[in-house]
């Protein structure tokens, strides 16, 4: 299998072949697990406005929705979670205007894990990510938190498959950091949470995860400690 993959990679480099990526809309169809959860969570957000002023929102996927599991480290920081388990950059782009109507002063964005896991290309991910950032206008400050590492060995032991790799995560984070270059637009900041969560191989540290993909209490504690408030 490794030999076959090496040959494919060689021809991609020589002939400029690219991965096809995914059709995001297929994942969000009504009747699918993600599609139905996406609709339900958007309704939940409308019914539960942020209780603090100024409004600070944390947008993302299951690792963001997971902040609501006690202890909630966001609550003392007066940051309201707006996570949807399974969500991808396409989903955040679809719902960003709803969140902007909450008049946030700060947005914390951690998204991309599920894009890569589902087989999206880094180009697809970045196209959506850039569009999300373009929708968020100054003076709103947006903190782009690096896509966290994964631990494929622990994931496999828990029966979780993924198309993501540490190399893809590195590449996506490098390009996200570039999007946050102050010369592009003020009020964008890159938060390199990846290296606070990864071991020396780039894998998610075993003591910080429940299943190799999701952060446990200690993982959330580490990440919350580096969030600017």
Image (cartoon, grey):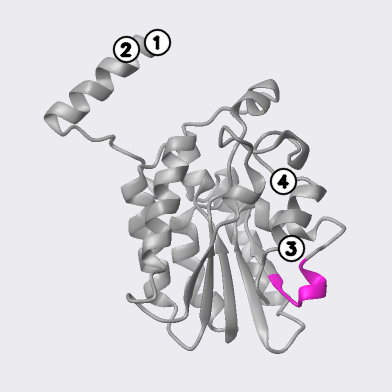
Label 4 to label 2: alpha-carbon separation: 33 Å
Going from N to C along the chain, the mark reached first, 4 or 3, is 4
Q: Which mark is residue 225?
A: 3
> From what the image shows, is residue 168 above or below residue 72?
above
| Residue 47 in the image, given as x and y percentages of width and height | 71, 76
- The residue shown at (50%, 38%) is 117
Q: Which mark is residue 38?
A: none
- The residue shown at (52%, 51%) is 30
Depth check, mark 3 against mark 1: the one in front is 3
Q: Which mark is residue 215?
A: 4
Per the image, the residue denoted by label 2 is 4
Depth check, mark 4 against mark 3: the one in front is 3
Going from N to C along the chain, the mark reached first, 2 or 3, is 2
Per the image, the residue denoted by label 1 is 1
Judged from this view, the residue extending furthest toward the front is: 200
Q: The residue tagged with tag 4: helix, strand or loop?
A: loop
Mark 4, Cα crowd under 10 Å, few <14 / some 14-19 / many 20+, is many
Label 1 to label 2: alpha-carbon separation: 5 Å
Label 2 to label 3: alpha-carbon separation: 43 Å
Which stretch appears magenta? 74-80
Quarter of the image for the N terminus: give it. Answer: top left
Going from N to C along the chain, the mark reached first, 4 or 2, is 2
Mark 2, Cα crowd under 10 Å, few <14 / some 14-19 / many 20+, is few
Going from N to C along the chain, the mark reached first, 1 or 4, is 1
Q: The residue tagged with tag 2: helix, strand or loop?
A: helix
Front in this rendered view, residue 37 or 159: 159
Label 1 to label 4: alpha-carbon separation: 30 Å
- The residue shown at (62%, 28%) is 160
Going from N to C along the chain, the mark reached first, 3 or 1, is 1
User: Which image quadrant is residue 221 in?
Assistant: bottom right
């Amino acid at each position: 299998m490794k030999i076959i993959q090496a040959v494919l990679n060689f021809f991609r480099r020589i002939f400029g072949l690219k991965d096809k990526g995914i059709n995001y809309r297929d994942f969000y169809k009504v009747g699918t697990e993600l599609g139905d959860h996406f609709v339900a969570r958007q309704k939940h957000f409308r019914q539960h406005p942020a209780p603090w002023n100024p409004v600070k929102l944390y947008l993302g996927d299951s690792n963001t929705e997971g902040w609501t599991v006690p202890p909630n480290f966001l609550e003392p920081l007066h940051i309201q979670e707006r996570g949807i388990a399974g969500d991808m950059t396409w989903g955040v782009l679809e719902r960003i205007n709803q969140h902007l109507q909450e008049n946030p002063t700060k947005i914390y964005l951690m998204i991309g894990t599920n894009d890569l896991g589902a087989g999206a290309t880094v180009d697809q991910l970045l196209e959506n990510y850039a569009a999300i950032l373009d929708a968020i206008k100054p003076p709103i400050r947006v903190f782009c938190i690096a896509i966290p590492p994964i631990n494929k060995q622990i994931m496999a032991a828990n029966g979780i498959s993924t198309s993501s790799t540490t190399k893809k995560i590195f590449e996506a984070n490098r390009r996200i950091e570039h999007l946050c270059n102050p010369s592009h637009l003020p009020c964008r900041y890159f938060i390199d949470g990846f290296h606070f969560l990864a071991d020396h191989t780039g894998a998610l540290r075993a003591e910080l995860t429940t299943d190799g993909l999701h952060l446990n209490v200690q993982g959330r504690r580490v990440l919350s400690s580096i969030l600017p408030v």
